[in-house]
Amino acid sequence: MFGPVRDVFSELPEAKMRGYRPGRFSFNVKGGRCESCEGEGMVKIEMHFLPDVYITCDRCRGKRYNRETLEVTYKGRSIADVLEMTVDEGLEFFRNIPAIHSKLQTMSEVGLGYIHLGQPATTLSGGEAQRVKLASELNKRSTGRTFYILDEPTTGLHFHDVKMLLGVLHRLVDLGNTVVVIEHNLEVIKTADYIIDLGPDGGEKGGRVVAVGTPEEVASIEGSYTGIYLSRLLEKTVAARRN
């Protein structure tokens, strides 16, 4: 997604006048980045016998770019300002640029609206990293023949974001793809077409197939802890619909 953002900045009158190409707005290569921190925004201080310490670069003050690059602005924002935006903020900022807006929209739909556009991949949780990959896949043309495996993708998500993510997963299935989700969240489990419940406990006391079937079928199987709690949730769902 960063490619189209660099293109936007390179097409600005100020950038053209200075002869800046898209690469100028990358913090990974020489030219536009701050060379003191090599575009990291942080400087490592090696501590003998102790973990290394990272401090904000005193030249760029954490912005990753040199002064000349930061002088080029779009809607009053520099490239560093854009990287500090969250996905949802970027969604509004780039609403008139389809190539960027559509990608950010997908990221927001999978529950990533709060992460920053320039956030290092190493700081993402496992669930966040999976959703970033999922968003990337969703932006590709669907073949209807892709097999997706997700390991607890809802970890840390608010209920509203879980609901949005489920909508995306079901959309993938409706397009003909297969989606396998490893999950403990009953709100996710109850929407599955088919469940394989492993247990009955964790560790050495688990790993056996306890129950299989639709959510309703698993909810009626004795010996399945998932089934016990799932049946209660399904009863509440049915009662809520009646009311």
Image (cartoon, rainbow, N blue to C red):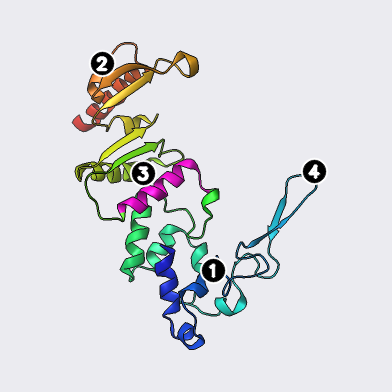
Residue plotted at (29% across, 26% down): 195
- Residue under pointer 2: 220
Measure the alpha-carbon separation of dots 2 and 3. 28 Å
Q: Are marks 2 and 4 in contact (CB under 8 Å)?
A: no
- The amino acid at mark 3 is His
Q: CA distance from mark 3 to mark 1?
A: 30 Å
Q: Residues within 10 Å of mark 3 (few under 14, many from 20)?
A: few
Crowding at label 4, few (<14), some or many (≥20) Cα neighbours within 10 Å? Answer: few
**Number of residues whose C-alpha sits closer than 10 Å to that of mark 1, classed few (under 14), some (14–19) or many (20 or more):** some
Query: Does the image show residue 111?
Result: no
Numbered disc in front, either 2 or 4 = 4
Asked if the magenta segment contains residue 128, the reply would be: yes
**Residue 80: mark in rendering:** 1
Q: Where does label 3 land, which residue? A: 160
Q: Is residue 203 visible?
A: yes
Q: Are marks 4 and 3 in contact (CB under 8 Å)?
A: no
Q: What's the amino acid at mark 2?
A: Ser
Mark 2 packing: few (<14 Cα in 10 Å), some, or many (20+)?
Answer: some
Distance from label 1 to label 2 (Cα)? 55 Å
Give the residue drawn at x 21%, y 46%.
144
Q: Position of residue 172 (x, y in %)?
A: 25, 45
